[in-house]
């Protein structure tokens, strides 16, 4: 999490959030559930996300215990982006840990700029939908800029959580590709994530969801709130909302106690998820209760493991693992994607002395991505009655046409079904099921 201009952004964001709540509707609310099917494999793997493993990583990454880097003991005192040897050791520590879990694709991604550095990327390539990519991210560097910067909450907590999730995923396959990305330079301008997201966009990568795990472990007030922060809801930010909903669903589906997922949908952009928004990707910031309270140790030498709320932190991490398992379709055991109706737009036409209507349907999957190749079937009623079907194009759109009637009238179009091999039509997710138009 970034501090700017000598003061913390939180007070400003709190004021903004209050204004949005009053003038713009519910900006702060418990994330609505969108439905998640219980999976016994995921439930069993949740036991692997535990306080013992998380604590050990925190102790090593903050200097409480020596870490092993390159086969030699190394004690972290700082991980500041400008610390030279220390941040290089932090990159190496994460790289080696990912390899030790059995991930076969682990790499450094160098970036340049005012302070060059390296992202560390671990990948499990998807089995049946490899072009669809899920990114689980966090940041390696910390604050303050002095010689001592333990950075336990910000963001060793994110690093330990993502490592634990990568370890749990490592023996399994996913339908989608999942990447565990440890960004550098977050505290000095999101340098690593800005490079990563821009490169992904430039190469046409289809990142269907990005979650940034930043400051997960402080809840001394006992609020149990964990924020799932997104942009303000619009038709172009539905992916953010879906990611937030999936986190709430994961908590509920696997009965994870001790946390209350809460969405703050005002576009808080003070971590690496910002870089993905800037490049057109759906993303969410997962963070402790920043709306109402602030970790007093933030960006100080007092941000140590001893100040963290471990039961809360473990619960936050478990829910993140369960969400990641579902959106990446872990081990191919989870249901194939639901398909649903995103929108219906009606238009009229004239043919000689007769009139008719067209219904342009947008079919999406549950991630609000276009359902290319889905067959949409619907019926027209009113002025004339008919049925029609067609196959959706790359944008998920299909246009169906009514029969005509002399002099025109009023038609209602209703979607009656959507089909695609390996997918299921989930009408409960429809944003719209029917539409009506009078022509002329």
Image (cartoon, rainbow, N blue to C red):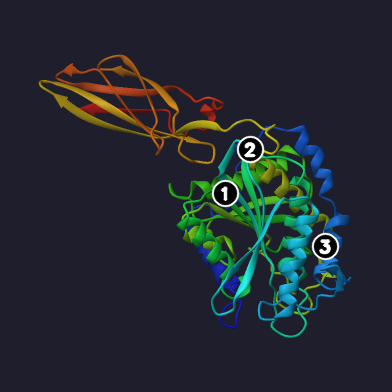
Drawn side of residue 22 relative to residue 180, left or right? left
Question: Looking at this view, is 408 or 140 the one in front?
Answer: 140
* In contact (CB < 8 Å): disc 2 and disc 1: no
Drawn side of residue 145 relative to residue 423, left or right? right
Q: Quadrant of residue 77?
A: bottom right
Question: Looking at this view, is 339 or 438 the one in front?
Answer: 339
Question: Looking at this view, is 56 or 85 the one in front?
Answer: 85
Drawn side of residue 139 relative to residue 270, left or right? right
Cα distance between the residues tagged 2 and 1: 17 Å
Nearer-N-terminus badge (2/1) = 2
Helix, strand or loop for disc 2: loop
Query: Disc 2 vs disc 1: which is toward the camera?
Result: 2
- Percent from the top left, x then y, of residue 235? 43, 46
Cα distance between the residues tagged 2 and 3: 30 Å
Residue drawn at the location 55% of the way across and 31% of the way down: 338
Query: Disc 2 vs disc 3: which is toward the camera?
Result: 2
Q: Residues within 10 Å of mark 1 (few under 14, many from 20)?
A: many
Residue that label 1 marks? 209
Q: Indicate whether 88 appears above or below 423.
A: below
Q: Residues within 10 Å of mark 2 (few under 14, many from 20)?
A: some
Residue that label 2 marks? 127
Q: Indicate whether 418 appears above or below 104.
A: above
Residue that label 3 marks? 57
Residue sitting farthest toward the left: 352
The image's mark for residue 410 is none
Helix, strand or loop for disc 1: strand
Residue drawn at the location 78% of the way across and 50% of the way down: 102
């Amino acid at each position: 999490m970034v501090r700017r201009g000598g003061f913390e952004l939180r007070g400003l964001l709190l004021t903004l959030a209050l204004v949005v709540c009053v003038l713009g509707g519910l900006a702060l609310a418990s994330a609505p559930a969108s439905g998640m099917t219980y999976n016994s494999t995921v439930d069993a793997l949740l036991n692997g996300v535990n306080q013992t493993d998380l604590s050990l990583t925190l102790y090593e990454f903050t200097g409480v215990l020596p870490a092993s880097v390159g086969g030699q003991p190394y004690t972290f005192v700082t991980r500041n982006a400008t610390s030279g040897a220390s941040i290089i050791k932090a990159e190496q520590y994460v790289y080696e840990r990912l390899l030790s879990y059995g991930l076969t694709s682990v790499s450094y991604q160098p970036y340049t700029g005012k302070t060059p550095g390296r992202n560390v990327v671990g990948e499990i390539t998807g089995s049946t939908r490899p072009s669809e990519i899920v990114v689980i991210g966090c940041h390696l560097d910390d604050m303050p800029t002095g010689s001592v910067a333990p950075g336990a909450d910000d963001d060793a907590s994110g690093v330990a959580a993502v490592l634990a999730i990568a370890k749990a995923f490592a023996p399994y396959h996913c339908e989608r590709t999942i990447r565990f990305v440890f960004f550098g330079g977050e505290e000095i301008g999101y340098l690593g994530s800005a490079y990563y997201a821009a490169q992904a966009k430039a190469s046409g990568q289809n990142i269907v969801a990005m979650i940034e795990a930043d400051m997960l472990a402080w809840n001394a007030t006992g609020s149990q709130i964990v924020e799932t922060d997104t942009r303000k809801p619009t038709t172009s930010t539905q992916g953010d909302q879906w990611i937030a909903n999936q986190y709430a669903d994961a908590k509920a589906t696997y009965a994870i106690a001790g946390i209350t997922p809460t969405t703050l949908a005002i576009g808080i952009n003070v971590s690496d998820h910002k870089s993905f928004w800037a490049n057109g990707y759906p993303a969410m910031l997962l963070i402790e209760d920043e709306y109402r309270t602030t970790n007093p140790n933030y960006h100080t030498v007092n941000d140590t493991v001893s100040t963290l709320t471990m039961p809360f932190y473990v619960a936050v991490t478990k829910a993140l693992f369960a969400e990641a398992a579902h959106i990446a379709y872990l081990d191919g055991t989870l249901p194939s994607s639901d398909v649903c109706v995103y929108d219906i737009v009606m238009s009229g036409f004239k043919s000689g002395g007769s009139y008719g209507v067209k219904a342009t349907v947008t079919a999406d999957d549950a991630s609000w991505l276009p359902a290319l190749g889905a067959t949409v079937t619907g019926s027209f009623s009113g002025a004339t009655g008919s049925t029609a079907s067609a196959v959706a194009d790359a944008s998920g759109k299909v246009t169906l046409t009514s029969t005509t009637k002399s002099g025109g009238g009023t038609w209602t179009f209703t979607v009656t079904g959507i089909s695609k091999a390996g997918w299921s039509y989930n009408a409960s997710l429809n944003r719209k099921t029917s539409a009506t138009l009078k022509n002329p």
